[in-house]
């Protein structure tokens, strides 16, 4: 029943946002398809904020729909292209192959895949080197852990998420070589109860610093952390310090609005060319953001060490896991 209602909602959204119009009518339309809820305070919420910024800054028509399954995702890509949308964002690694199939039918539509893999015609990836920021979060965790145990909860074991985990562990071990790392993948980005249980299981094993890349499922993780005052959580994709006040030392942030706006502005100005657009710390799109209210409890010099590491990553003298894939 949930899927039927979702598809009906998608049809209404498309009908209300230019459905049945021609690509050649001169109106720039931009669509966003997310694989989960925009109320996740992270990955999907950031993309939706980006869509709103595109609308407000460039004055273009926009539309958004959720598509959780592969079949729904391909259907949404095709429906938007057929309805005259010039730019369609598939928000996640999983949209790459469906977009390539649909693109063969709609060569005038630019399909932008966030965390995508490759250029294929008008299918273009935005690559976010989030592992550069998770390295800095890991440094923070390595300095703050009292048990020597850190954890990571992922929604699904996708390559960009695995890279984020690897950066997290590498950063922690740069500060404390004997750190023990645990990881768990939920096979869902939506189940907050599963996120909470995964976090609680780690806490029971002595983990006192937990990072994630689990979207809405991570809301359960933050709930678990709030029940354990000595445990710290680290935000992903957005500054998530408000989800467990005083217990989120830092977040690995992606400025999704800035990245989405870059592409649409180029299309609007007629200067867009298909390419891999890769964002790291040097771009300002990827950032490590700390909670200033928590820094009183930090070891002396920690913030300066993290800042120095960020400078070294930007300069290329510090290589983070996966950074060679630029």
Image: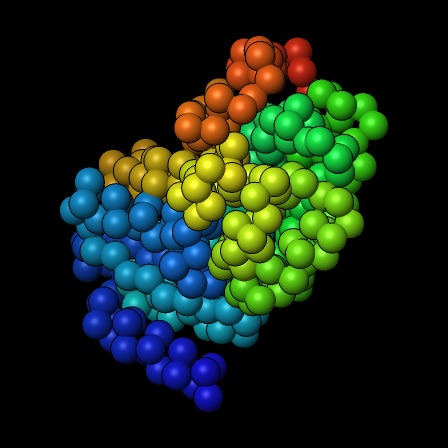
For image coordinates 59% across by 48% down, the residue present is 228
For image coordinates 65% across by 39% down, the residue present is 209
Q: Nearer the viewer, residue 49 or 80?
A: 49
Side of 168 where 29 appears, left or right: left
For the question of whether residue 155 can be seen, the reply is yes
Query: Picture quarter containing residue 199?
Result: bottom right
Q: How many numbered marks appear?
A: 0
Where 31 sits versus 324, above or below? below
Query: Picture quarter containing residue 23?
Result: bottom left
For image coordinates 38% across by 59% down, the residue present is 39
Q: Nearer the viewer, residue 13 or 117?
A: 13
Where 153 sits versus 181, above or below? below
Position in image of residue 117 (x %, y %):
60, 45
Residue farthest along the bottom direction in this orientation: 1
Q: Nearer the viewer, residue 109 or 313?
A: 313
Query: Picture quarter containing residue 115?
Result: top right
For image coordinates 23% across by 52% down, the residue present is 28
Position in image of residue 51 (x %, y %):
30, 50
């Amino acid at each position: 029943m949930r899927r039927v209602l979702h598809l009906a909602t998608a049809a209404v959204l498309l009908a209300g946002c230019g459905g049945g119009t021609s690509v050649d009518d001169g109106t720039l339309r931009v669509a966003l398809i997310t694989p989960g809820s925009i109320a996740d305070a992270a990955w999907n919420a950031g993309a939706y904020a980006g869509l709103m910024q595109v609308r407000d800054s460039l004055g273009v028509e926009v539309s958004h729909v959720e598509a959780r399954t592969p079949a729904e995702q391909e259907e949404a890509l095709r429906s938007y292209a057929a309805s005259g949308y010039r730019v369609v964002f598939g928000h996640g690694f999983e949209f790459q192959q469906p977009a390539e199939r649909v693109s063969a039918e709609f060569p005038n539509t630019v399909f932008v895949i966030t965390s995508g893999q490759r250029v294929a015609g008008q299918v273009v990836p935005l690559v976010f080197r989030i592992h550069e920021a998770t390295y800095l979060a890991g440094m923070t965790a390595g300095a703050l852990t009292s048990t020597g145990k850190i954890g990571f909860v992922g929604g699904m074991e996708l390559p960009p998420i695995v890279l984020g985990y690897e950066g997290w562990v590498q950063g922690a071990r740069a500060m404390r070589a004997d750190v023990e790392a645990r990881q768990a993948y939920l096979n869902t980005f939506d189940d907050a109860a599963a996120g909470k249980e995964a976090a609680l299981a780690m806490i029971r094993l002595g983990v006192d610093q937990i990072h994630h890349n689990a979207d809405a499922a991570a809301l359960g993780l933050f709930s678990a952390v709030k029940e354990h005052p000595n445990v710290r959580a680290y935000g992903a994709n957005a500054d998530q310090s408000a989800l467990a006040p005083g217990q989120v030392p830092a977040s690995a942030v992606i400025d999704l609005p800035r990245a989405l706006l870059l592409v649409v502005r180029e299309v609007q100005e007629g200067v867009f060319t298909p390419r891999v657009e890769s964002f790291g710390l040097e771009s300002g799109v990827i950032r490590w953001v700390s909670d200033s209210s928590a820094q009183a409890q930090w070891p002396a010099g920690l913030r300066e060490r993290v800042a120095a590491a960020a400078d070294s990553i930007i300069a290329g003298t510090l290589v983070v896991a996966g950074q060679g894939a630029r």
